Amino acid sequence: MTEDKGFTVIDKRGMPSDEKETKTEDEIKKDSTQGDKQETAADEGIFAELTFSTLILSLSTSVLVSLGELPDPLRNEKKMNLPLAKQTIGIIEMLKEKTKGNLTEEEDRLINNILFDLRLKYVNTAR
């Protein structure tokens, strides 16, 4: 009885016709699992350092982008969006209220300082 070796895939996307790449089923599975491992490692690296402080800092950066103080990371241009800035400041205020009594002294000081600074920048920008 002959052993079935699987199938062969020829990927012609983006390659000149004389440089066709041929992969066996085992090579495709190997490439797929390596890609999954790399994505999982990258995802874990992103979320490993997520803390309350990084959340507040991320939201404050979003407010600064909305106020036109920092460029939008996607378009690399400064553009004002006051309603979005006000809404994001409101989200930080809500988080402060909902976490009252559950924050460390450092986290409490951070959220208070950030809110003070963002409110002041918002008022100065909105005038």
Image (cartoon, rainbow, N blue to C red):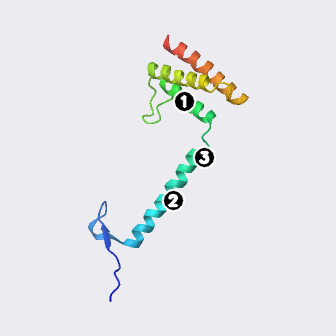
Q: Earlier in the sequence, mark 3 or mark 2?
A: 2
Q: Residues within 10 Å of mark 1 (few under 14, many from 20)?
A: some
The x, y position of residue 103, in whole percent, is 68, 29
Residue type at the position of mark 1 = Leu
The x, y position of residue 88, in whole percent, is 51, 24
**Residue 19 visible in the snapshot:** no
The x, y position of residue 3, in whole percent, is 35, 84
Label 1 SS: helix
Label 2 SS: helix
Instruction: Give the residue pinned by disc 2.
Output: 37
The x, y position of residue 65, in whole percent, is 50, 27
Instruction: Give the residue pinned by disc 3.
Output: 48
| In this view, 27 is above or below 108 | below
Residue 83 occupies quadrant: top left
Q: Which mark is residue 59?
A: 1
Residue 60 occupies quadrant: top right
Nearest the viewer among 29 and 121 is 29
The residue lying furthest to the bottom in this view is 1
Q: Residues within 10 Å of mark 3 (few under 14, many from 20)?
A: few
Residue drawn 62% across the image and 43% down it: 49
Residue type at the position of mark 2 = Lys
Q: Tell me how far mark 1 sits from mark 3, CA to CA.
A: 18 Å
Question: Image quadrant for the N terminus?
Answer: bottom left
Residue drawn 68% across the image and 25% down it: 101
